[in-house]
Amino acid sequence: MGVGRTVDEDPLSRLLAPPPNESPEEREIRLKLEAEARLRSERIDEQLRAEKAALKKNRPVKVLLLGQSESGKSTTLKNFQLAYCRDQWEAERASWRMVIQLNLIRGINYILDLLAEELAGGPTPALAGDSDISDDDGAGPSAYAPNRAGSMLHFTGKHRLLKLRLAPLRTVQRDLEMRIGAQAGADPSDVYDLLSSPPGSPVMGASGRRPQEFFVRSATSWKQPAHMRSPSEGQGARYQDAQVRETADIIAGCAEDMKAIWEDQTVREMLGRKGIRMETTPGLIAVRDYQPTDDDVVRARLRTLGVQEHRIRFDKGPAAGSEWCIYDVGGSRTQRIAWYPYFDDCDAIIFLAPVSCFDERLAEDRRINRLEDSYMLWKAVVSSKLLAKTSIILFLNKRDLLEQKLRSGVRVRDHVHSYGDRPNEVEHALKYFQQHFRDILRKHSPEPRPFRSHITSVVVRMVSLHMGFVPPC
Ligand SMILES: Nc1nc2c(ncn2[C@@H]2O[C@H](COP(=O)(O)OP(=O)(O)OP(=O)(O)O)[C@@H](O)[C@H]2O)c(=O)[nH]1
Ligand SMILES: [Mg+2]
C-alpha cells in the first residue's frame, strides 16, 4: 500500500502531513516547532507521571485479604491489629468479650434445641410407650431416643431440669445480639448457609445440621461502646455497664449447669451421632469478671459480610512509616462478586488457603471440596489481568489443624486421589499442596511472577507479619 494513499485515506495523517510545496526554510521552521511541541508534550507527560507517583506514595498501600470463608482472613487481620494498633485493640477488647460470650451462648442454646427435639420425640422418633419411664433422679420422667445403631439414648429428668434452668440464656442471646448489632442467621444471599457453623463457638458440625453463624455488616460500629452508637436513645454509659454486668451475672449463674450439660455423656452421644464436635469448654468464659485474653480475641469467630476496610499505620518493621488500607472480605461463594471492584489499584493480595480442609466441603455448597475450591479461587486470582502487576502472597493456613487431622488418622489420599502413596505426614502433605498452588500460578499468571508462600497457623500469634513481603509503595 502506497504512502500517498494512506495520507489520502486518513484525515489525521492528511492534516499532519507537510504541505506539498514546502520550501527548505519553511521545512526548517516546521521541524523546529515540532521539536518544541514534542519537548513540551514530554515535559507534561513527565509531570503527570511524577504527580501520579506522588499521589501513589501518599496514598495508603492497598492490601486485599482473599480466600474462601473460614480460611482465616479476619484472623490474619487481627494479627496485624494486635501487633500494630495496640490502643485500638485494648479499646475493642470489651466488644470482643460480647462476641465470645455470644458464641458460647449460641452454642449452648443450639444444644438445648437439639435436646428439646429429642425430648419431644425428635427427628428420630422416640419410641412411643417406651419413651417415658420411671425417673432415675426424681426430677421428672425420662425419655429414650434411638441412635444410628438403634440403641437408646437415655434422657432423664436431669436433662429436662437443665433445659429449664438454662432457659435464661435465650434472653441473654437476644440481648447480646442486639448490643453487638449482629444479624443472627444466614447471609441473606447465602441460600446454603444453614449448614455453616462458627468454629469459635462451642459446637461445630462435621456434617448435617449446624448452628447458624452470625455476622455484623459494619467493620467498626459494633466495636464502639453502645452508648456512643445511640446517643439519641438516651442510653447512658451507666445503663450499658449495668447491662454488661447483668449479662455476666446470668452467664455466671448458669455456669454450673452449662458445665453439666457440656460434660453429660448422653448429650455428647446425641451430638456425636449428629456429627457435631464439641470445641471449647464454657469454663473460663462463664466467670463473672471474664476478660478475654489476646488469644481469645484472635480466635473469636465473627463472620465477615461484604468488604470491610481497616487502616493500619506501621510504626516499626519493614513497612515502618507507611499506612496500609486492608480490605477484609466475606469469603463465601455468593459474596465473591463484591471483591472485583477492589482489584483495581490494589497493591498486594494475601491469599489464604486452609490446608486442613482437604476432606471438608463448602458450607454453602456441600458438593464442593474445600481444597478444590481454594485451587479454583487461586487460579481465578492469579490469572486475572487486572491483578497482573499486583504482589500476591499465599498463606497455606491452618497447619496446626492439618497436623491434628493427620495424626488422628485421616488419610489425604482418601480425599485427594492424586496424592497416591506419599507418606501421610504433615510436611509431605504441605509440600504436595504447595506444589499444586505453584503449578497453577506458573501456568495461569498472565505475566511471570514469583511464587511467594508461607505455611501458617494464624490463630497462633505470628512472629513476623510481613513474612519478607513488602508491597510496592
Ligand atoms: N486452628 C486454627 N484455626 C484457625 C486458623 N485460622 C483461622 N482459624 C479459625 O477459623 C475460623 C475462621 O477464621 P476467620 O478468620 O473468621 O475466617 P474468614 O476467612 O475471615 O471467614 P469469612 O469471614 O467467613 O470469610 C475462626 O474461628 C478462626 O479462629 C488456624 O490457622 N488454625
Ligand atoms: Mg472474616
Image: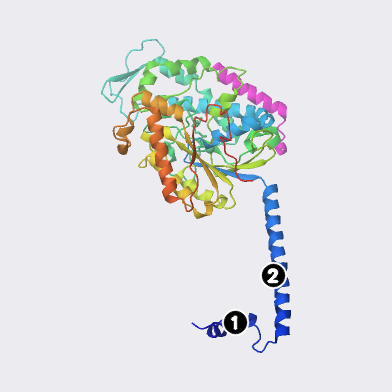
What span is colored magenta in the figure? Answer: 230-253
Whether residue 231 appears in magenta in the rendering, the answer is yes
| Nearer the camera: disc 2 or disc 1 | 2
Secondary structure under tag 2 reads: helix
Residue position marked by numbered label 2 in the rendering: 38
> Mark number for residue 11?
1
Mark 2: few, some, or many residues within 10 Å (few <14, many ≥20)?
A: few
Q: How many marks?
A: 2
Q: Is residue 16 above or below residue 309?
A: below
In the rendered image, the residue lying farthest to the left is 150
Q: Earlier in the sequence, mark 2 or mark 1?
A: 1
- By what rule are the colours in the image chosen? rainbow
| Residue 126 percent across, percent down from the top left | 31, 25
In the rendered image, the residue lying farthest to the front is 24
| Residue 381 percent across, percent down from the top left | 48, 48
In the rendered image, the residue lying farthest to the bottom is 21
What whole-number distance in Å separates the C-alpha atoms at marks 2 and 1?
A: 21 Å
Q: Is residue 130 above or below residue 343?
A: above
Amino acid bearing label 2: Arg
Q: Nearer the viewer, residue 159 or 131?
A: 159
Residue 369's quadrant in the figure? top left
In the rendered image, the residue lying farthest to the top is 137
* Residue 387 visible in the current orientation: yes
Mark 1: few, some, or many residues within 10 Å (few <14, many ≥20)?
A: few
Q: Residue at x 60, y 21 (%)?
A: 248
Q: Residue at x 30, y 37 (%)?
A: 417
Assign the magenta stretch its main secondary structure: helix
| Residue 444 percent across, percent down from the top left | 43, 50
Q: Nearer the viewer, residue 184 or 453?
A: 453
Horizontal side of residue 50 vs 358, given as left or right: right
Amino acid bearing label 1: Pro
Whether residue 368 appears in magenta in the rendering, the answer is no
